[in-house]
Amino acid sequence: MNLNLNDIGIRNTFLPGDIGYIIHLHGHLYAAEYNYGIEFEIYVAEGLLDFYTRFDPGKDRFWICEHDNKIVGFLLLMHRENNAAQLRYFLIHPDYRGIGLGKKLMELFMQFFYERKYTSGYLWTTHELEAAASLYTRHGFKLTKEVESTAFGKPLREQKYELNAGNES
């Protein structure tokens, strides 16, 4: 497949089937790539339910990436207490990695973050997602905490990255 970023559509509306498919995609890909168990899929399902029920269009945003009517990427920004934003469920299908889609999603996240004047941001990931961590640090996130965990059906280190908006606009 010879793709470029212009071949991908990005939308900010949920259609019937999207949430279930995003949960499925996370469960399927993380099992195949990192040997995560069903616990991870349940975690994603619960988090997306929480996001959907608390959704505030003035504070929250999600980006669904599509190619040929198939979801190939996803990212969301969820408002939290104390004017903080949480980055969650960043996913790019393996067939669509390396074309700049992850970078584009991070740029859209950061643009919305600053437009809505969030003062801080954070995300949780695991030590195994090194490429994602590199993308986060390039956008100013810093590793602030590591915790040993078996939450996703295997031993790993959960990592918290934080972003302080400071006086940037």
Image (spheres, rainbow, N blue to C red):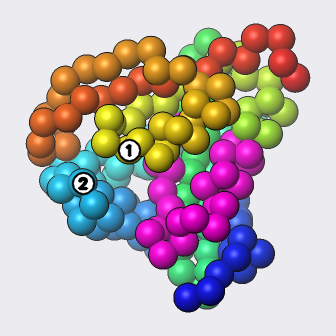
CB atoms at circles 2 and 1 under 8 Å apart? yes
Give residue 159's quadrant in the image: top left
Residue linked to disc 1: 129
Q: What is the quadrant of residue 137 in the picture?
A: top right
- Tell me the crowding category of disc 1: few under 14, some 14 to 19, or many 20 or more residues within 10 angstroms, Cα based: few
Location of the C terminus (image quadrant): top right
Location of residue 107 in the rendering, given as x and y in whole percent from the top left corner: 73, 45
Q: Which corner quadrant holds the N terminus?
A: bottom right
* Closer to the camera in the image, 124 or 51: 124
Task: Classify mark 2: helix, strand or loop.
Answer: helix
Give residue 138's position: percent from left, percent from top: 64, 34
The residue that disc 2 covers is 34
Residue 57 in view here: no
Question: Which sits in the foreground, 102 or 131?
Answer: 131
Residue found at x 13% / y 36%:
155
Identify which residue is drawn at 53% across, 25% down.
Answer: 122
Look at the picture and state if 9 lies above or below 26: below
| Image-quadrant location for residue 102 | bottom right
- The boundaries of the magenta stretch are 87-109
Q: Residue at x 12, y 42 (%)?
A: 154
Asked if 143 appears above or below 45 in the picture, the reply is: above
Query: What's the CA distance linking mark 2 and mark 1?
Result: 9 Å
Q: What amino acid does circle 2 point to?
A: Tyr
Can you give x and y, in whole percent of width and height, for residue 141 in the image? 58, 25
Amino acid under disc 1: Leu
Looking at the image, residue 132 sits to the left or right of residue 146; the answer is right
